[in-house]
Amino acid sequence: MERIAAHLSRVVQGKEAQARLTVTSLIAGGHILLEDVPGVGKTTLAEALARSCGLSFARIQFTADLMPADILGAQVFHATSATFTFRQGPIFRQLVLADELNRAPPRTQSALLEGMAQGQVSLDGSTYPLPAPFTVVATQNPLDLTGTYPLPDSQLDRFLMRLSLGHPAPEVEARLLTTRGRTPPVEALEPVTGPEELSGLRALAAELRLDEAVAEYIVRLAKATREHGDIERGASTRAVLAVGSAARAHALWDGRDFVTPGDVRAVLVPCLAHRLMLRSNVQGAAARDEASHLLEELSRKVAAPR
Amino acid sequence: MSTPSRLRLVLRDLGAGAAFGSMVVSGQLPVWAVALFGLALLCALAGWRLFARRARAAAVLLLAVAGMLGLSVYTGQLDLVVAACTFAGLISGHRMLSTPDARADGQVQLIGLLMVAGGAALSGELIFALFLVAFCVLASLSMGLAVVEAAVPAGEPLPVRAVVRPLSVGLLFAIGGAVAFFILFPRLNWNMISRRAAPGLGATTGLADTVRLGGAGTLKSNPRVVLRAHITPVPHVEQLGAYWLARTYDTFDGLEWTSVAGPKRSRPRVTLRPGGERSLHQHIELLPAYGARTLVALETPTRMGNAVAHMASGSRRTSLMEVGGEEVRFVASGISYTYEATSLPPAELSSTRVTDAELGQLLALPDQLDPRVAELAQRVLAGEKDPEAAARKLSAFLQREYAYTLELSGEVEDPLSDFLFVRKAGHCEHFATALTLMLRTQGFSARLAAGFFGGERSDDDYILRAGDAHAWTHVLVPGRGFVTVDATPPGNRASQSLAALQFITGLYEALEARWRSAVVDYSLRDQLEVAQRLVRPPKEQGRASARLPPARVWGLALLAGLATYAAWRLLSARLLAPRPHHATLLVDTVERMLREAGVRRHDDETLEELTARLVREQHSLAEPLAPLTRRYLEARFGQRPLAPGEAERLLTPLRHFLEARRAPATPGPRPRA
Amino acid sequence: MSARLSALWAWLRAMLRPPRTLKVTRTGRTYLVVTLGVGLGALNTGNNLLYLVLGLLLSMVVVSGVLSERCLRYLSVRRLGSESAFAGEPFAYRWALTRQQGHAFALTLAEVDTPLTGEGRVGYLRAGAEHVVRADLTAPRRGPCSLSGVRVTTTWPLGLFAKTRVFELEGTLLVFPRRGYACQLPGEALQGPFGDAHSPRRNDGTGDVAGLRELGPTEDARRVHWRKSAAVGKLLKVEREREERRTYLLTVEAHLTGEALERRCEEVAALSHELLESGHEVGLETPGERLRPAAGSAQQRRILRALAWVGFEQLRQEEEAAA
């Protein structure tokens, strides 16, 4: 794990925390939504993740005219054998990068999201299973909303975490400028682990011990979001489960076999911020900031078990 | 505020109902007004706001009613106060049925307040106090809810439970404060013009001018209290078992007893016969349930006077009139009366002035008397010549051979022979009539006496119930005057209603008496007494001290109670609080040490986060802290509890480190945290 | 010496100021009149029951005072402020109320000594939880508005008296200029194509494809992308875009004062809003500040902030020095 993270931050410089969270999410078996302005390395991060884990990778650039078949694949007629065969779409990879997810019409979005939820693809009455560790890293640009189809709340709920990379610190940016030529390009990354090891980690994470006190802490946090005056709709039960699994994966970083309140606090904001519906009618980036802000405030207010 | 809360409106309307009820208990409001208000209250409770639409028509209607009330006051049919109270009730009903906005709410509460004040002016009933408290509680709750409702955003639920609790506590304090104010506020005026008489449920007995045999004896089972007497010297027995004389009868026509003597002139006090040395003095109160104008006193009454009649419009002294048959009546009619009477004890010889006409009547027999009556008397007496002995013989015979019953079916032609020879059962009037007439057939003078038998203790007083009404016989013994002989079996003389019912009415009577003496008649004198008792506790003497422990014992008991309560609160808080984990104790220690060492932390940083940050910053403190933190997390959340003594072992490096750091006189810059 | 005297004076004034102020409401006035009447009646007639009623009325007044005091104790307020406050129109403003113990009912919150009008209400506040109160406030004019405290008023429990407690809380609210109507056309654009085209969106079938949208009921059928429509099964329309983003520089002239300055600020706010909405870049030059042209909603906020500070540069420097 450490190796993956180290690998990642070599490529995406100055973003150790986000890299760690990405790997956490990967191990928790969840999908990731990267939300930020263009040009801060979203795509690079996802690609680096795929390469260092040795996963098969596909990138789908979502555009307004992208059709579900462009993602899932289609029945193709073979003239020689006079039969239809299924040609797999780009979704049949272990790690799929859905770039600018909100640019595609809802029908196309939901094709991807169904795959994310079910782990399989249904097409023309037959179902095709997706490869075993299957993770989607979706990106979207929250600022430029013209010509986009914002994801409905229920779809946002399918992402385990929402991360925002943010601009790198000035010194990192300066270093980037000077060393641009010499940093290892993404293509050059060597896989440090394989899909089997990743599955092993996932199984390990799922078996981590979640103490009663910590479980109760998560529930209390969720309850606080539901009772908060500024939040229209608080964390759902699925959100609670998501926090639990993400916290489990996070505990692996320290090599622990149990979850601490610290793990919960670390994953709380990325896991919950996109699932809350705020009462104020600010949109886009401001809403995201406010949700994170509210969650931080809540995590300060709800006393952690000692 | 969208739609007003149903609960609040119901409380408001019930409060108005209670306020109206406090006026109704005086029994002076016209029946139609009570009916109208009841109707309005029912409609309001059911949620039919009938006047919400036709506000103007309803106002005109109200105006018409006001005109009618004014007219009846002008013609003298209605008291001004009563009319005002009636009108207040009608306005309240009208406001309840209009659109429930803030204005109407305020008006309903305000009129409720006025109605309670009106009720206070109209009546002094105990039930008034209940209605007062009910109004206070209901109106306050409704007002409190209204205040909160106005501030709760539309669509959010009203926090009823949360509102009710502090309000109820406040109300308790308010009632306590009201009592304190009541006791302590100096009464500067002496003109007590409170109306202390209200007819209540109406009268029951109605001691008539005649006693008619026959009819059903439902009266015997009526438990209502009609008379209350304070007797000096106090007899100190639970059941007095005495005869209370109202009047006597000397003429019987076969069906009815009447009296021949006519009324005499009225005087403020009446002396019936000279008193003796061991006279019993009675202060008697005839309650509204009594319903007649005849004075009652213990047998044998000597003097009566000092009578006050209480009317709806106030209390007035009244003079007395002797009617004949030893009956004394009040000249003025009132709802209730108080007077003083003295009586000779039963053993004393009493002389009675009897006119010749009356004396002649004492042997008179009805025209168609059954001859068997005389035969029977003769057979039983067997030649007995002494009047008292003869009377005792006859009454023993009657008590032995005849049964007591209250189940009599209607009128009969000759009730006496029906009783003696056919049914062989009857009630006290039958027994008394039979004895009197049998005595007369044998030439002994006798007459019928009517009044009450019994006397039940209630506090220091004795009460009589409607069911205690009784009839017995007076035998004229030459040289001794009239001697009382009772032919009714002893067990059936007093009231015969249900025991539970008697208990309840007795309790109510006791409460009502307390209420009257402690609240309605509270005066500056009582205040002075209270003040005196506060300043100088009364000398404990006799029974009083034996019954009530001294004040300091109460104080000690109170203190002990408070201490117990405090201890219980403390203990329960201790026991209920979740017991901290062993590892948590370790964290507490570490945090205390860090605080003492001056390591500053962010607002709510847990130890875990602090350690992580220090490690990240490569702070020197991280070295001793990291293993400690890790072990703590394991113990707390990882189910690997600390071994005994392990905590101390873990803390040692940290302690050493902190001591080493403190050793230099000027510690370097503290860790920015 | 004089400083010490003035400090003493301030301290004295703070000591003398009552911690709570009390106002009798309409209902309360009626109640007091009735109480007086019952009291007179009781004194006049000596009717003990009237004394009892009077005692109840008076002790309700006392209890009401105690309950309202309990309601205002253990209370703490902090400002959450507003997203954006525009002059002359209601904006959402928030406070956070916390109660350490016990309950509070029927609180009304408002800012003290400010031209801001409007108040927020809380029906019920339970202990422990932080409650956010929202209010629609209105500020009469543009510019920084200094806030000195929050006034909390309650009519609990019976609505007879309104008790007020003031929480001292310094703060500043920046009120943006009202977005009036832009009467003047913006000056010539600094960059980009000139002419009468206002929007970079093109409808003439030229330019790059910006996206596909379902055809609306009144839209031009010539824009339908037939092949995609056939594949999807419903009518899709092509939207095209051309690099027509232009750059404007708006100015608030230095010589303007008073009404004219306000008017200009409103106008610039409206103009910048309009231009930024249609995708252009807008810069701003005010007497105290210069903003480089940029696009997007962030730029809009920057412009509004700059406009709000126009005429209050002195205050701004103090503010920034303090921060």
Image (cartoon, rainbow, N blue to C red):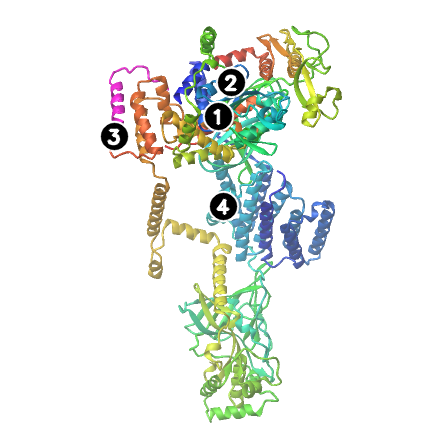
Name the residue tied to disc 3: B648
Q: Chain of mark 2?
A: A
Q: Nearer the viewer, residue B474 or B321?
A: B474
Name the residue tied to disc 1: A270
Residue B42 locus on image (x, y percent) = 64, 53
Q: Is residue C300 above or below residue B482?
A: above
Using the numbered discs, state the Cα–Cα distance from disc 1 to disc 3 in whole angstroms: 38 Å
Name the residue tied to disc 4: B168
Q: Amino acid at mark 1?
A: Pro
Residue A68 painted magenta: no
Q: Amino acid at mark 3?
A: Glu
Using the numbered discs, state the Cα–Cα distance from disc 2 to disc 3 in whole angstroms: 49 Å
Choose the circle earlier in sequence order: 2 or 1: 2
Q: Is residue C171 left or right of residue A208?
A: right
Q: Amino acid at mark 2?
A: Lys
Using the numbered discs, state the Cα–Cα distance from disc 2 to disc 4 in whole angstroms: 62 Å
